[in-house]
Structures are given as C-alpha cells and as structure tokens.
C-alpha cells in the first residue's frame, strides 16, 4: 500500500519519505528546516501545529532550532515559510492525504506556507475514498481536507504551474511508529 | 441567426490564439483523460452518478429540507429561495450586518449566474476573484469562456499586460513569474477580506456538508481566513447521502482536467473555529432559479445530473473552434446552451443552440450520463413551437413532406443542374432545395436515380430471404451506385432486395431543425411503405436514415401524441439494420464470402457520428474491410465529426470548413490512399473537401469497396 501511495503522490509532485519512528522523522525534519530556513532569514522558519506526533515529545530542544513556532495564528502562519501538520489518513489510489482540519491551526499551517510538511502514520494508508468514508464523520470533523500534491494551476495557457495560493512543495513524512497518543 | 452572432463566430474562428489553445488542449485531453480513467469502469461509475443524481433531482424538496435541518443543527444559517434577486439582497444584508468592506470569492458559477459581483460593488463592497483564471478575467473585464478554465482564451502576453497594469510594474511573459505575482497580490486580499463567498461542488443532505474542489487552494483560504463565509449553492448540487460524494469525486477531476483528484477537496460541515475566538458565521444559500421546474420536465430533468466537469466542452468540435465567448452567456458549450435556455430564457438560446452539430461526442463522455444533443434538439423543437419555423425552411419542408413533389423537383434538378455540375458534388438534399430558394447554383444530381435503375437490376430467383432497402435521398438521387452495390452484395448472400417506391425522406433534416410535424409525416409515409409483409430486414446504407428508422420515428410520433402509429414504428425499428452490421452477420454466418488472400493495401476508416455513437457499429465495417484484404491504418480522431452534420455544412460553413480541414489533414497523415466510411453524407463532405484540397485520396462507402471483393 505504501509503495502505491508513494508512486501516486510523487506522480502529482509530492515528495514522500518513510521513517521507522519519531526519531527517524525528526532526524529528517530538523536538518530540512535548517536548510530551508537559513540562519539570517527575515521570516520565521516554521509553524508546527499541534498533533499526536508532538504529544509527549520534549519540545525544548526543538525550540532551539531556528524559528520553530508552536503557536499557529494567521500572522505566524502567513509569515512562515514552512508549515508542519499531521494527517490522519492517506489514500493509495490517488496519493492523497486526508486530515481533520477542524482546528484552524491545521488549515493555516497547511495553506498559507510555501512548504507543507505533512506527517502521516504509515499504517493509516487506505486503499481509496470508499475505505476512508466509514472512518470519518463530518458531524464531528467540521473541516475535512484532502490534500493531493502541491497547489497548482494551469489557468495561463494551460501551462502547469506549481504553487499558487497554497504551498508550492508538499513533503510527506510517513512514520511507521508514530508514538504519542494512539488514535 | 442574428448578425452580431455570426460576427462573433467569425471573430472566434479567426482568433488563432483561441482556436490554437483550445485545439491543443482538446487533443491532449482525450489521451490524458483515458489515462486518468485507467482501471476504472467508467460505464458503471457514470451509471452510479446518474442514478444518485437523478434520485436527488426527483427529491429536491425533501433533500433541501434535510440539508437545511442538518446544517442548521450544526450552527449554519440556511436560506432558500427561487429568486436570484432575493439571493443578492440576502448576501448584501449579511455583509452590511457584519460591516463587510471587502469580499474574496472562490469560483462559484452560481454567483456569476446572478451577476453578484456588480451588485455588491454597486453597494460599495470590493469583490475580489481569487481563482487565478477568474482574477485574470476580472482584471480584463471579461466573462469566463470555460467552466473549468475560465481564461483559456488568453495568452501569457495578455496576462502580463493585465498584471503589469495592476501592480504598476512592467512584468515579463514568464508564466511561473506571473503566477507568483498573482500569489502575492491575492494573498493580501485574502488576509484583509471580511467575507468569503464560495460555491459548492456537492451539498450533502444527510450531513449538511458542503464539498469544495480546487487545485489552487483558494477555496481553503476563502473559507478559512475571513470572519464570515457565505456559500451560494444551486440546489442541483444536492445529494442524499455522505457516500454519494465518492463517485462524484472519482469522476469530476478525471473528467474535468484528467487528474485523479484535484489538489484540494474540502468538506465543510457547519461553522468552523476561527483564530479570532468564536465560530465563523456560515450562511448557506440554496438557490433554485428554475431548477425545480427543470427537475419536473421529463425532457430536461436529466440536466440536473450534471456535475459541472466541463468535459462536454473539451470534446466538442465546435467549442474547440469558437471557445466560450460566442455563447454570450455564463454557462457555455453544450450544457451551457441548456442551462441558458432555463436560467435565462428559452429565446436566449435561439442562436447558440444552432451551434450544436449533433455529433454526440459529449454524450459519449458525460459522467452524469446527460444526453446533451437530445436536450438541444428539444430546445430547437420548443423554439419552433413557440415562434414557428422560418419561412424559407417552412417552404422546403412543405416540399419534403410531399413525396411526389419532392422527388419531382430532384429529378428536375438533375437536368437543370447539369451545366453547373463540377466533379459530381451536391449538397445535402433538403438543403439543396434551400439552395434553390436562395437562387444559388444547382448541385449535381445523378442523371438516373436509384429508383429508376432498380427495376432493371437482375436479381437471382432462388433467394431464401428478403430485405427492404431504404435508400435515403442521398443514395437514391446522388449516389445510386452505392445502392446497386448493396443489392449485389445482399443477392450474393441469398437475400432478395425489395425497393418500395413510396419510401421518402427519413425526416431527419426536419427533426433536426425542430420541425417535428414534418418529421412525423415522413415517419408515417415510410412506415406505410417499408413494412412489407414477409421481409426479414429493412436495411439502409446511411447511418442517419438508419437512426431515424430504428430510433427516432417512435420518439417523434410519441412527442406529438400520435400514438396510433407507435406499434408499427416499433415493428419497423426492430427490423432495421445498417448495412455493415448486416453484412458482418452474413459473413459470420458463412453466407457471404470475401475473396481470400487479397492484399489491397492501406486504408483508413472514418467513423460517422450516428454509426458509432447511436448505432454502436464500430467494428463491423473495420472487420469487413480487413476481411476483404485492406490493412487499416487508424487516423487520429477517427470518430471526430467531418463537419457535415446534416444541414450544418450549409448553415454554418465558417465552422464546418475548419472541422473538415482537420479531418482531411488527419486522413492524409495516415498516408493511406483510400478512406472508407459508412455514411453517404460523410462521403459527400470529405470527397468535396479532397476535390478542393487536390490530394489524391479515394473516398468510398464501405458498400462500394466490398462489392468489388466478393467471391462469386
């Protein structure tokens, strides 16, 4: 399932990585932030929205990484280059992520930034939309977001161009053992 | 047809940017769409969509109630109205109550339908379109030309000019740079806006949810950043259950842009939290604007199965030449013609309905299973009922409805036409008569029609079956040799051919012009003539005639309430078969034998619209020709209309001509010296085209090619 998801997600321009556990994922994310943020960047490096990944994690060392903010507001998100959120599900047939974005922080961090890093438990990759539907409930999840690749347009001369109103890069980090609170 | 309309067609066809962009897109679309649907049973998928959407359309009132109840339970305010004016007043009031100064919008055709922008702007509220294409259109002061790609008619140079003016800085024609400029400019508008207005692709009654599909991500910002969200939803977007969104989301992106899924799908159920503390204010307006009335109309209720993917535009040979602006209204193309007739007024569709060539491409690919050509035909019929027929047309059909007068004039034309006969070309016959009335030069008509040649044909005495041959005007009076070839072939299979002299025009020209009374007269005359006792088949070598006999007589009579002929129309329909399908059956049954081991060289095959899409005979002619010894080299877009379209080639030559040019080009590209087809109308059009083109390509009806290759 992972292989199909990865192929489909990469087919629409997402970048897909897989790690065993949270440490593995952090070992990828922190250097990534460093590289993309730059020490003297005028803008904050990243906003990181609350997620099971962060639960129980010692955030103090993370705060020392240049410019990570855990307070996500319109202002911080609009100012950030990178947004990190966690998606609950992924769909193998279309390479999509599915996230309960009822909390506005999730939407801001994933829609206003240039780069969206999305964490997803590898075990939550489902075959397709039909398999997903019984697992989500619109009555409790007021804003369900499907995200498939980066923002794109072809409105000028039908030329595919990446990154219009949403992120121009979607970096998907699959984590086999997410730790934190089980969902 | 109004003069301004004709001029707008001329301008569109002359606009190389537009026709180039649309042509390239539609060619690529076909390939990409097929790829996007790989592994998916499209027929099953669209059956599901048609079933769910028609169920919703039949229960609009109940679904709207359920939706309102469920959305309100979540905290949304739901407003329902049939009246576009009330929609505008409501939105303005919400804006005023909330002190709204600026609005950002994410594509909502329903707001275009009621001209909301101008209304809000008049009240002093700034309205910003946020979809890149829509914003370009807004800056240019134009209307969208395509449902999914609103600015497809513009070049990057034009966009660069527009943006340069907007940001007061000279920008280059680099598309990624221009997109960046749009991102920057619109970001500020998003962050500053007090109200977001969106549409919805789907509204789910069971959960009160709105589903929004975008690629750019603007809908996410419009529904997240401003304090107030207003969603304007046409009630045709309602579905009953939450899982009804699955088939629609499966088909919509694949059919619209050949994507597996758009970048973003948002499902919003009730007001959502904001950063400013309280829940967002969410207003959902369910707008009717004649949709319920449409749902109650037996001919048009299927239009509510539309999921607005725009694929009917993408495959339309006319749309790719003229684009959307010729349609002069909000909704364009085939579906647009239908929506215009309803959401505006019937007579507003008077000119644009004439653009439809009735090729059926759109019907073939529609994920909602709409029969768009049939609905456009119905518009035509209702226009004729409402306003009567144009006088000249009336005169022509008066003649066509009187067989002896009609045939007498054709005979006269064969004599009168001789001096003008160049290369043996004629026009479609009922329109040849219109030529007469216009005083144009007369086309060529065979010196001796098939009906006069038939009695002299020697048929074997020991035939075990009989077939009634319906010649159709074109074979009877222009291509009698096709009829002779057919008799020869059927005789070889042990079938005796009968030719009832009382047969007359199949009525298709009248029906396609909306003159159903005339078509019904033709139908009755032919039913009387063709139902010969003991005959095994009624066979025609013209797909349009075959469709008339096999599918349309009953429908025409029924729509006029002439039920007394229905049983016999059905009997005729059951006996009717097109030539290639019958010949293939006879070959399979061992009753016809093609000469063995022939190597006749390359040939390409042109699929005629009615044969492929109504009669579904794609393989029989190919297998017959292959069996005869031809190597078939398939041409690009082999099933794209040749531009003949019955009377179309005469009524709209400025559109028919470029369609024909494209067809000739595709035929020549195969390098085959022969092109075969099963429709005498297509033969006439393509032969005529090659006559001017001077290319050395033989244009033949399958029946002629086969007659040469039979074992004696």
Image (spheres, helix red, strand yellow):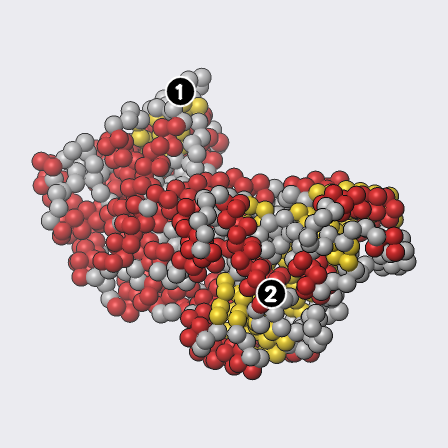
B210 sits to left or right of B707: right
Which residue is found at the position 39% from the left and 64% from the top?
Answer: B340
Label 2: element kind: helix
Of circles 2 and 1, which is in front?
2
Front residue of this view, candidates B627 and B614: B614
The chain that hosts pointer 2 is: B
Q: How many C-alpha atoms fall within 10 Å of the one at disc 1: few (<14), some, or many (≥20)?
A: few
Residue B561 seen by the camera: no
**Residue B626, image x and y in percent?**
45, 26
Tell me the quarter of the picture where residue A3 sits: top right
B676 sits to left or right of B388: right
Q: Which residue is mark 1?
A: B601
**Quarter holding the N terminus of chain B?**
bottom left
Residue A104 seen by the camera: yes
Which residue is found at the position 41% from the left and 62% from the top?
Answer: B330
B627 sits to left or right of B239: left
Label 1: element kind: strand
Q: Which residue is mark 2?
A: B191
Disc number placed over residue A67 in the picture, else none: none
Tell me the quarter of the picture where residue B683 sits: top left
**Residue A141, image x and y in percent?**
74, 66
CB within 8 Å, label 2 to label 1: no
B586 sits to left or right of B457: right
Which residue is found at the position 33% from the left and 33% from the top?
Answer: B664
Which residue is found at the position 29% from the left and 67% from the top?
Answer: B385
The chain that hosts pointer 1 is: B
Q: How many marks?
A: 2
C-alpha separation, residue under disc 2 versus residue under disc 1: 68 Å
**Quarter holding the C terminus of chain B?**
top left
């Amino acid at each position: 399932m992972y292989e199909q998801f990865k192929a489909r997600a990469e087919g629409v321009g997402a970048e897909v990585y897989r790690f065993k556990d949270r440490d593995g994922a952090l070992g990828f994310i922190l250097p990534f932030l460093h590289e993309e943020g730059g020490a003297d960047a005028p803008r904050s490096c990243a906003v990181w929205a609350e997620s099971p990944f962060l639960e129980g994690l010692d955030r103090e060392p993370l705060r020392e990484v240049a410019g990570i903010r855990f307070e996500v507001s319109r202002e911080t998100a609009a100012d950030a280059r990178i947004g990190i959120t966690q998606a609950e599900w992924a769909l193998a047939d279309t390479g999509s992520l599915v996230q309960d974005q009822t909390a506005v922080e999730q939407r801001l961090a994933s829609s206003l930034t240039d780069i969206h890093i999305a964490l997803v438990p590898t075990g939550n990759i489902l075959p397709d939309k039909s398999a997903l539907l019984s697992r989500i409930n619109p009555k409790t999840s007021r804003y369900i977001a499907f995200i498939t690749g980066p923002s794109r347009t072809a409105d000028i001369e039908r030329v595919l161009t990446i990154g219009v109103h949403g992120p121009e890069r979607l970096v998907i980090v699959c984590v086999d053992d997410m730790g934190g609170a089980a969902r | 047809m109004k003069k301004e309309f004709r001029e707008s067609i001329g301008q569109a066809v002359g606009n190389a940017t537009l026709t180039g962009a649309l042509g390239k897109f539609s060619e690529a679309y076909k390939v990409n769409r097929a790829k996007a649907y790989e592994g998916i049973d499209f027929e099953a998928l669209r059956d599901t969509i048609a079933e769910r959407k028609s169920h919703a359309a039949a229960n609009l009132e109940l679904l709207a109630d359920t939706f309102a109840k469920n959305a309100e339970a979540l905290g949304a305010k739901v407003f329902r109205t049939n009246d576009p004016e009330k929609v505008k007043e409501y939105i303005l009031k919400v804006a005023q109550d909330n002190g709204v100064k600026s609005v950002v919008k994410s594509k909502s055709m329903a707001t275009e339908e009621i001209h909301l922008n101008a209304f809000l702007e008049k009240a002093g509220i700034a309205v910003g379109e946020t979809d890149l294409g829509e914003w370009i259109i807004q800056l240019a002061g134009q209307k969208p030309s395509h449902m999914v790609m609103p600015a497809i008619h513009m070049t990057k140079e034009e966009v660069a000019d527009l943006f340069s003016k907007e940001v007061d800085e000279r920008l280059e024609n680099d598309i990624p740079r221009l997109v960046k400029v749009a991102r920057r400019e619109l970001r500020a508008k998003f962050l500053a806006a007090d109200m977001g207005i969106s549409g919805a692709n789907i509204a789910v009654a069971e959960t009160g949810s709105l589903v929004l599909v975008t690629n750019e991500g603007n809908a996410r910002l419009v529904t997240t950043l401003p304090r107030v969200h207003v969603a304007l939803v046409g009630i045709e977007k309602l579905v009953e259950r939450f899982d009804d969104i699955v088939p629609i989301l499966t088909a919509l992106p694949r059919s619209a842009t050949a994507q597996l899924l758009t970048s973003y799908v948002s499902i919003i159920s009730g007001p959502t939290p904001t950063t400013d503390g309280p829940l967002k204010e969410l207003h959902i307006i369910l707008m009717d604007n004649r949709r319920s009335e449409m749902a109650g109309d037996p001919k048009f209720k299927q239009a509510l199965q539309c999921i607005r993917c725009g694929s009917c535009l993408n495959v339309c040979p006319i749309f790719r030449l003229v684009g959307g602006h010729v349609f002069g209204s909000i909704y364009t193309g085939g579906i647009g013609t239908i929506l215009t007739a309803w959401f505006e007024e019937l007579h507003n569709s008077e000119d644009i309905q004439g653009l439809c060539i009735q090729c059926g491409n759109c019907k073939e690919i529609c994920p909602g299973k709409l029969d768009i050509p049939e609905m456009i035909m119905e518009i035509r019929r209702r226009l004729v009922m409402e306003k009567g027929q144009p006088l000249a047309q009336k005169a022509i059909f008066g003649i066509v409805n009187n067989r002896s007068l009609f045939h007498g004039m054709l005979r006269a034309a064969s004599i009168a036409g001789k001096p003008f006969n160049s290369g043996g070309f004629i026009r479609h016959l009922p329109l040849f008569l219109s030529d007469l009335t216009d005083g144009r030069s007369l086309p060529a008509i065979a010196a001796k029609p098939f009906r006069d040649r038939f009695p002299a044909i020697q048929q074997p005495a020991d035939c075990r079956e009989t077939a009634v041959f319906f010649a159709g005007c074109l074979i009877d009076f222009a291509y009698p040799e096709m009829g002779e070839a057919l008799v020869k072939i059927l005789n070889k299979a042990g079938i005796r051919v009968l030719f009832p002299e009382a047969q007359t025009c199949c009525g298709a020209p009248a029906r396609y012009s909306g003159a159903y009374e005339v078509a019904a007269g033709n139908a009755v005359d032919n039913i009387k003539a063709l139902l010969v006792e003991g005959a095994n088949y009624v066979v025609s070598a013209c797909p349009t005639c075959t469709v008339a006999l096999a599918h349309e007589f009953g429908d025409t009579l029924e729509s006029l309430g002439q039920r007394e002929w229905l049983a016999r129309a059905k009997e005729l329909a059951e006996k009717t078969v097109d030539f290639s399908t019958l010949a293939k059956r006879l070959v399979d049954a061992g009753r016809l034998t093609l000469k063995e081991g022939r190597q006749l060289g390359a040939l390409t095959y042109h699929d005629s619209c009615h044969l492929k899409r109504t009669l579904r005979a794609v393989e029989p002619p190919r297998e017959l020709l292959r069996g005869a010894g031809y190597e078939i080299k398939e041409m690009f877009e082999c099933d794209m209309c040749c531009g003949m379209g019955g009377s179309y080639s005469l009524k709209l030559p400025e559109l028919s001509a470029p369609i024909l040019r494209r067809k000739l080009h595709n035929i020549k590209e195969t390098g085959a010296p022969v092109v075969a087809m099963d429709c005498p109308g297509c033969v006439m059009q393509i032969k005529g085209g090659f006559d001017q083109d001077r290319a050395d390509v033989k244009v033949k009806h399958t029946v002629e090619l086969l007659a040469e290759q039979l074992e004696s």
